Amino acid sequence: MFWVMTYLVGLGVLFSLIFAYYNFRKGSKMEHGTPTMQDIARSIQEGASAFLKREFSIDIPVIVVIAVVFGVIFTPWAGVSFLLGATMSSLAGLVGMKAAVIYNERVANEARIGVEKKDPSTLGKALHVAFRGGSVMGLSVGGFAMLGLLVVYILVGMALQFANTENLIPTTSWVGLRFIVFPQVLACYSLGCSAVAVFNRLGGGIYTKGADMGADLVGKTELGLPEDDPRNPAVIADCVGDNVGDVNGNGSDLLESTIGAVVATAVLPTTIYTAALNTSAPLTESLLSRLMEFPLAFMGVGLIACVLGIAYVLLRKPRNKLSRELNISLWSSAALIAAASLLLAYFFFNGQDLTGIDFRFGWISPWLSAISGIIAGISMGILAERYTSEKYKETQKIAELAKEGPALVIVGGTSSGWRSCLPACTVLGGAIIASSYFSGIYGSAIAAVGMLSFVVSTVSVDTYGPISDNAGGIAEMTQLDEEVRDITDSLDSQGNTTAAVGKGFAIGSGVLAALAMMMSFANGEGNGGVLNIINYLALGGAFMGVGLMHWLSGQMLNAVCHNAEQMVNEVRRQVRENPKILTGEVKPDSSKCVDICTKSAIGEMKKPVFVSLLAPIIGGVVFGPLFVGGFLLGTILDSVVMATSTANSGGAWDNAKKYIKSIKSSLVQEFGEARYKEIHDASIVGDTVGDGYKDVVGPNQDIMIKMMATISVIMLPVMNAFNLISLILK
Amino acid sequence: MFWVMTYLVGLGVLFSLIFAYYNFRKGSKMEHGTPTMQDIARSIQEGASAFLKREFSIDIPVIVVIAVVFGVIFTPWAGVSFLLGATMSSLAGLVGMKAAVIYNERVANEARIGVEKKDPSTLGKALHVAFRGGSVMGLSVGGFAMLGLLVVYILVGMALQFANTENLIPTTSWVGLRFIVFPQVLACYSLGCSAVAVFNRLGGGIYTKGADMGADLVGKTELGLPEDDPRNPAVIADCVGDNVGDVNGNGSDLLESTIGAVVATAVLPTTIYTAALNTSAPLTESLLSRLMEFPLAFMGVGLIACVLGIAYVLLRKPRNKLSRELNISLWSSAALIAAASLLLAYFFFNGQDLTGIDFRFGWISPWLSAISGIIAGISMGILAERYTSEKYKETQKIAELAKEGPALVIVGGTSSGWRSCLPACTVLGGAIIASSYFSGIYGSAIAAVGMLSFVVSTVSVDTYGPISDNAGGIAEMTQLDEEVRDITDSLDSQGNTTAAVGKGFAIGSGVLAALAMMMSFANGEGNGGVLNIINYLALGGAFMGVGLMHWLSGQMLNAVCHNAEQMVNEVRRQVRENPKILTGEVKPDSSKCVDICTKSAIGEMKKPVFVSLLAPIIGGVVFGPLFVGGFLLGTILDSVVMATSTANSGGAWDNAKKYIKSIKSSLVQEFGEARYKEIHDASIVGDTVGDGYKDVVGPNQDIMIKMMATISVIMLPVMNAFNLISLILK
């Protein structure tokens, strides 16, 4: 099946990258806006570049050091593969973000021209522009991720013969570590993607939320300026934040999720294979390679389907039914994938000797598992919608509580977020049970691949959101016609539902991929495929795992808080020292805000990143692999509830605030203007708290658990070679 | 060792109950306060009784039904034992609370008389009165809990010979369930205590916090009344709440923890014994009975030591160094226990054949495990202090953030609570590793017993706090001299540190006891002592466990929120309909508030209680015991972080508010009066959110996990006899 896989992935990568390039060029060539618009777009561009430069100055050395260590203690290929993963992840983020920055202005301009011409189809046209912009990120994520993986698979696996079954037995490196080269190299590629993702997602998240909260806390609350008012010194930083956090960070996050899922699924069979080698039910070599290549081929199919889905929407005549347009691209790809992957499963596994792998229903089993994953992902998205959309009673109830002041808004939103964990966990637990029922432990891994097979579509829609949002910001700052802002606002709000589905996929697939890595770990040399949680080391590890995850979350929230504080102080300082800023006579010093925010975000990001990279290694070297197994379980279990509750509480607070604004007239009529302001202010407190929850704490959970699981798999040989506890227990 | 155990426990129970009776009588005979004071005390008394009556009307039928079911499907003794547990728990709560209500008034009166006489030792004298009042609860908890357990042990175990080793093999009940009678009966006693505890703790918690938040949200914030102002209609309900929640609820909680730990430790060896029966390393019968009786004897020693410690303080001349007095009782008991239990371990295990139990260092091993537990408990208390006391920078930082408004207060407090989970989990994980290293899986169970061996002292101090608090409330409502209030305030604040240690013990011991139950479950018939979390059913269970725990927490928070809303509406209604209430010309209708609060609390409590009782049973009958094993693990892991983070966030918000008040003059000087009010208001938002966190969500975690673990152990025979998944997988 090697060639089938190679063709599918190769074609998918080719289509994706060409289409990304085409959309990128098309954007650059579009008409520029007014000179003021260009000015602001340039400031955003510069701010984003400044952030990335500083971020690279931190993460490049770290990545190089890790690559060298891997290269030295394992094999040079491990180091190269890690570097390649980091490069692909960075490239995708860079390209996608550059496109987003360009498209911000173009969307605003398209809306401006349409409004001027009174063109009735402006909304639909603007949607196409924004979606085209978003698709560059989506296509780059899929294209670059799979390009790198294919290169590693072909070069290391095939050309160097490491994927051959005779090489899939442990070797000993010159420093005396026992490991199997090929899965090790694949895991290193995945870790490279994760490392960049955590820097981008966390650094970008702290940046964007610090800027956002800073802009809101002083600008809106203290000074009474409207959203995105050009007199607010923190507004440009806020726009930069949308690009570095919501665009770049989100892209690397989903790239990392995808690779994490595919690699975990490819690595797992090698551990099953070696574990079963001397048993009565060994895996055949042909089945092993099929099991390894199936997730890659699946992603290849996914890429092609998504390219078709996106192209279909962009080639249609622009229509004003926004959410329908976005949904079409997502669901047409999904339908294509479901059909094509059934053929794929037949092609890969029909007629094979399936001994040693628990395929309960023959060749169709992995397809059933993948579909369970897709259904679970969609269900999680629907659940998120139920708990966060102002159309449903949970969020309306929170808005209702705003009448009793900010405390009950917080209590209500927190309660709602906590309660939302039960259905989400039930869906995930159900997906694990169902997918494993169909295909054994391979099942839950392939379920994650299923969820992520239309990553290109979800990232495109995810990126479309902040592009529209920023277009609105530019419209506001350049004081364009109010109708322009209305158009960008409706563009922005339409992405939310589809984005909720994307978030459900990110959490669900992240957890399943981390579990697959954990299973690889448990299957690894010396662990024997069992993780007995009654063992006191595993149990102690599990406690420390949940504790660490909570600590990391607290640390991230703190980082946002610090950053926001600094922005608040800076905005206050500027306004105090130069009162003409508020009258509009003097332009605020936006670049100073950008600079402070950048420094602070990068500084705050270091501690959680390093701790999460080092914790499993230190745990393993002190307490041994059993401890790490429990530790990983603890982190995964904690991350599910943390990710779900923060995403849903945060989303609900955000929408409760919007809901209150939308029913302003009836509230004013009932309670009067002053009381309305109190109610609205109470809802803003919830929204501000939710900013850090939903955009920093929540989305980083899945990256961190995958990173910790992957590094545990990679460093298992080290833990086996040396750990303190075995010396004590001897 | 049976007689040694019986004497120790018997003496301990006798001493405790006689001393409790003596202190109770002494309080009743003390001088009454002024007629207004008596009036208010009577209202509180009536409110508390009304609450209990309504609560009993719900919990008695539930308990009787459960007892009948157990009696029918297992053995009548199971039902009787369950009823006895419920009775003992209720009795301890009733007696202790009755004493607290009496002592509220007496403490206020003692302070009043002292202030009138200008007696310099008033503070010390008032402390003695309050502590004597608190000790009634502490002594009743220890006395009644162990009395019931001793009765069950002697009657069912010894008199009926069920504790004999020939009877420690599975029998089949007439409905065809296979189980071992004696551990089953012991577990039922424990579940009886848990069932009452969850009603008391949760119902009381929802009551007290709803009343508190209701009184604050309208009274303090909207109407600008001071704390405990008699014009506030919700103030009496608030005082009632202190008694039914902080006194009665807390007492049953710790009673349940104690019995949970002792019973789990006594049951565990029977599962080890039966599992090892046909192996090469069986337990001797003598060792088995020693292992079962050791935790009971340990508690007997603890009771005696605590009686001595409390008596020592109460017999000393009253001194004004408050926290020293309270600490003396705690630490002298702790030192006594540490010394006496070393002798006990020697006496029980020296010279015994220790085959089959992993005592790494011979007879001293269980003592080492118990001491690890005690150290862990104390460390958790110290950590809680670090994260919540205004003396340390975490809480000061939150107070600092109040300058930026309520949103950052919430963010800061949440972050601090989350971060506090890592040290707490490390301590607990460390305790598990250390105690199990010394004594195998028996170790972590005996560590919980160690922590709880001075439960009488901790409950006495815990109860002393709300008694002093309520005395202050009475002083305020009857407009006594301000000095009286100052005295009760300092009494109240001094209990906090010691109470923090008590909270650490409750969480730590609760988790360890639940783990011991989980291990009994894993060791039980058909599970074989291994809980492989890689198994997909166990894994799915773990996901649903964390999800359910979060749902329960959200539900509890919601209940508080609903209750508070109703109180807010009632207070608003009264003030609106009769404005003379605010001028003090008309007395508010307090009893209406008490009534609403009672109804609401009882109503809101039902859903979480029933769900947590039924969830493991339904899970087991559908997905089988493996699923339940994972499920229990999930609930335990989630509860650790939930209990820690909510307790610490809530405590920190409370103290941050107090801290801001304490530095009021310097803040007013720096920012002016108006800005100070804003800062203080921001801190009140945190405090209000924290009320539900620290007094409802946090303290109920450990009860619920123990209840779920215990009911799983009890219902394991049912799950083994029938579960859906085994039919599907067949």
Image (spheres, coloured by chain):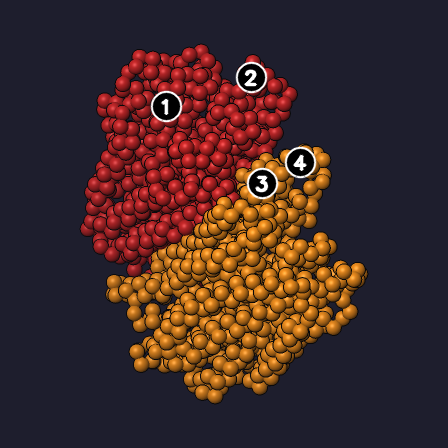
Chain colours: A orange, B red
Report the front residue among A682 and A112. A112
Reading the image, the residue beneath label 3 is: A682
Reading the image, the residue beneath label 2 is: B583
- Residue A24 against residue A376 in the figure, above or below: below
Which amino acid is tagged 2? Thr
The numbered mark, 1 or 2, whose residue comes first in the sequence reads 1
Q: Position of residue A559 (x, y in %)?
A: 45, 54
Chain under numbered label 1? B
Which amino acid is tagged 4? Glu
Is residue B313 at least partly visible in the picture?
yes
- Residue A24 against residue A547 in the figure, above or below: below
Reading the image, the residue beneath label 1 is: B486
- Residue B62 against residue A220 in the figure, above or below: above
Q: Quadrant of the N terminus of chain B?
A: top left
Q: Are marks 4 and 1 on the same chain?
A: no
Question: Mark 2–mark 3 contact, CB under 8 Å?
Answer: no
Question: Mark 4–mark 1 contact, CB under 8 Å?
Answer: no
- The secondary element bearing badge 2 is classed as helix
A34 lies left or right of A503? right
| Residue at 69 percent of width and 41 percent of height | A664
Chain under numbered label 3? A
User: Which mark, residue A673?
Assistant: 4
